[in-house]
Image: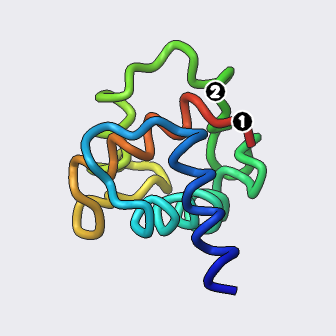
């Protein structure tokens, strides 16, 4: 099981170039957050649900830094919560890069 997790973490790192230095175990945790937590509103396949789609095509107009700010601070008067209490700026930028580059 641990070997499978390590392989998955390496695949994540290869598939989504990260901004800064995010260790492979944390990258795997961040991917899990995207799939489970973001997926609870944006759909498990990130193709939309309560929240808008989070596919590379749907986000093609966005800059990673802008997406990271949305992740960190949320969107007032919507269901998008702020993640700043749980994520660093570097981690939010990693997630933004992941969303822009990795197909669901």
Q: Is residue 66 above or below residue 60?
A: below
Q: Residue at x 73, y 53 (%)?
A: 43
Badge 1 is on which residue?
103
Q: Residue at x 46, y 49 (%)?
A: 78
Residue 19 disc label: none
Label 1 SS: loop
Residue drawn at the location 63% of the way across and 67% of the way down? 36
- Residue 62 location (% of width, % of height): 45, 19
Mark 1 to mark 2 CA distance (whole Å): 6 Å
* Residue 3 percent location from the top left of the image: 65, 78
* Horizontal relation, residue 96 to residue 4: left or right: left
Q: Secondary structure at mark 2?
A: loop
Q: Residues within 10 Å of mark 2 (few under 14, many from 20)?
A: some
Marked residue nearer the N-terminal end (1 or 2): 2
User: What x and y, as percent, mark residue 64?
Assistant: 37, 28
Q: Is residue 4 left or right of residue 63?
A: right
Question: Which residue is depicted at the point 45% across and 59% down?
Answer: 27
Disc 1 + disc 2, Cβ < 8 Å: yes
Measured as percent of width and height from the top left, residue 51 is found at: 62, 47
The N terminus - image quarter: bottom right
Q: Nearer the viewer, residue 40 or 78?
A: 40
Residue occupied by mark 2:
56
């Amino acid at each position: 099981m641990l070997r499978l997790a390590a392989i998955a973490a390496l695949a994540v790192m290869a598939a989504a170039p990260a901004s800064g230095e995010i260790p492979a175990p944390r990258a795997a945790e961040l991917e899990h957050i995207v799939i489970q937590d973001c997926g609870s509103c944006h759909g498990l396949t990130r193709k939309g649900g309560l929240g808008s789609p989070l596919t590379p095509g749907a986000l093609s107009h966005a800059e990673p830094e802008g997406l990271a700010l949305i992740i960190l601070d949320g969107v007032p008067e919507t269901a998008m919560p702020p993640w700043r209490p749980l994520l660093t700026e570097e981690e939010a930028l990693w997630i933004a890069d992941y969303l822009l580059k990795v197909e669901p």
